[in-house]
Image: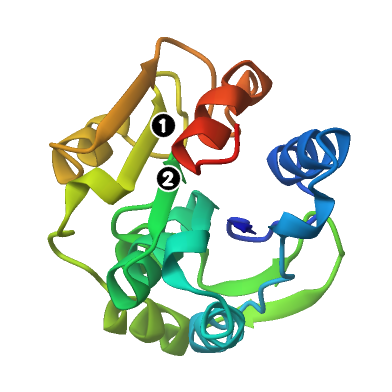
Amino acid sequence: MLVYLHGFNSSPASHKARLLEQRLEAMGRAAEFSCPALPDRPARAIALVDAELARVPAQEVTLVGSSLGGYYATHLAEKFGVRAVLVNPAIRPYDGLRAYVGPQRNLYTAERYDLTQQHLDELRAIDVPQPTRMERYYLMVTTGDEVLDYRASVAKYAGAKQLIVDGSDHGFADFADYLDSVLAFAGIA
């Protein structure tokens, strides 16, 4: 099972989620894909995915987390012992999102909410300072990420399988070129 965790103010309609879903559909394995619509509150987002992961044997799960979803995926990989593909993951979103406290609008759903200190506190509460068992992680970063410094991810996930793409952007515009490596890591190829 491949569980895609979208990023901040994103949704299951994100480009990377759709690419993965379409590839699995083409392989006749659509039932092995999940992309929950994550609530804006981190504690609720984690609870939602916790409930889904509790129903599936860990060896059958690979999380694919993009940006904030990568931060969530790290917490969940440590908790459940599952594999995780991290795409331009957020490393310290409780600091990085501080500048965005206030009114927000989801880019895909147009849902409005207020990002508050409580959101940041919930993010800090699930921080994983140093991931363990690095063989269960696959880090995919782009040097052209205009939102996050890819070098922080490379350092935090030293010892993990790593793909560093020269250029590109935070959205990982050329993600389609690397779908096979994601599926291979997940044991789906």
Residue 73 is situated, as x and y percent measured from the top left of the image, at: 43, 62
Residue 84 is situated, as x and y percent measured from the top left of the image, at 41, 52
The front one of 173 and 120 is 173
Q: Residues within 10 Å of mark 1 (few under 14, many from 20)?
A: many
128 horizontally vs 88: left or right: left
| Residue 29 screen position, x and y as percent | 79, 47
Task: Please give the label number shown on residue 140.
Answer: 1
Q: Going 65% across and 23% down the picture, which residue do you hit?
A: 173
Instruction: Find numbered disc 2 in the image and state the secondary structure of the residue it sits on.
Output: strand
- Label 1 and label 2: CA atoms lie apart by 6 Å
| Quadrant into which the N terminus falls | bottom right
Quick one: SS at disc 1?
A: strand
Label 2 neighbour load within 10 Å: few <14, some 14-19, many 20+:
many
Using the image, tell me which numbered label, if any, was put on residue 86: 2
* Amino acid identity at mark 2: Leu
Q: Is residue 169 above or below residue 103?
A: above
Residue 122 picture location, percent across and down: 39, 85
Residue 125 marker: none
Indicate the quadrant where residue 156 lies. Answer: top left
